[in-house]
Amino acid sequence: MVDEIKNIFLAGIGSAAYTYEKASKLVDELVAKGKLTIDEGKDISQELRRNFKDKAKETSDKIIPLTKEDMKELLAEMNFVTRNELDEIENRLLKLENNQK
């Protein structure tokens, strides 16, 4: 479960980095085509980098560690099955399979 949440977090970081990379490539292409001057391209790239770093810092400042109870509440709100519920379903399934033999 923790791995899944970690993967979701990493996917968010990856998509942000991908967006930054795509924006940088677009600026480079516009400079290459002559739509932007080299100085304008540098300014835009620096602004993109600054905005990206600011957003990353702002996001990391808001992250608070979750307690075990917080995690249980979050998973309950998301309707995740608990281990006990899964074991109960498995036992019921085994009983049904045994009754059909």
Image (cartoon, helix red, strand yellow):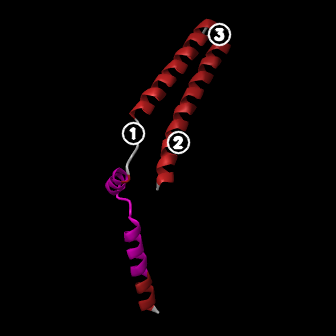
- Residue 46, given in percent of the width and then of the height, sits at 56, 15
**Residue for badge 1:** 64
The residue lying at 46 percent from left, 49 percent from top is 5
The residue lying at 51 percent from left, 24 percent from top is 53
Q: What residue type is labelled 3?
A: Gly
The residue lying at 65 percent from left, 10 percent from top is 34
Q: What residue type is labelled 2?
A: Leu
The residue lying at 38 percent from left, 59 percent from top is 80
- Residue 32, given in percent of the width and then of the height, sits at 68, 14
**Residue for badge 3:** 34
**Residue for badge 2:** 10
SS state under label 2: helix
Residue at the limit of the structure toward the right, as seen here: 32
Measure the C-alpha gap from mark 2 to mark 1.
Answer: 16 Å
Given residues 64 and 85, the one toward you in this image is 64
Q: Earlier in the sequence, mark 3 or mark 2?
A: 2
Q: Which stretch is magenta?
A: 69-93
Measure the C-alpha gap from mark 3 to mark 2.
Answer: 36 Å
**Which of labels 2 and 1 is toward the front?**
1
Q: In this view, does 69 lie to the left or right of 55?
A: left
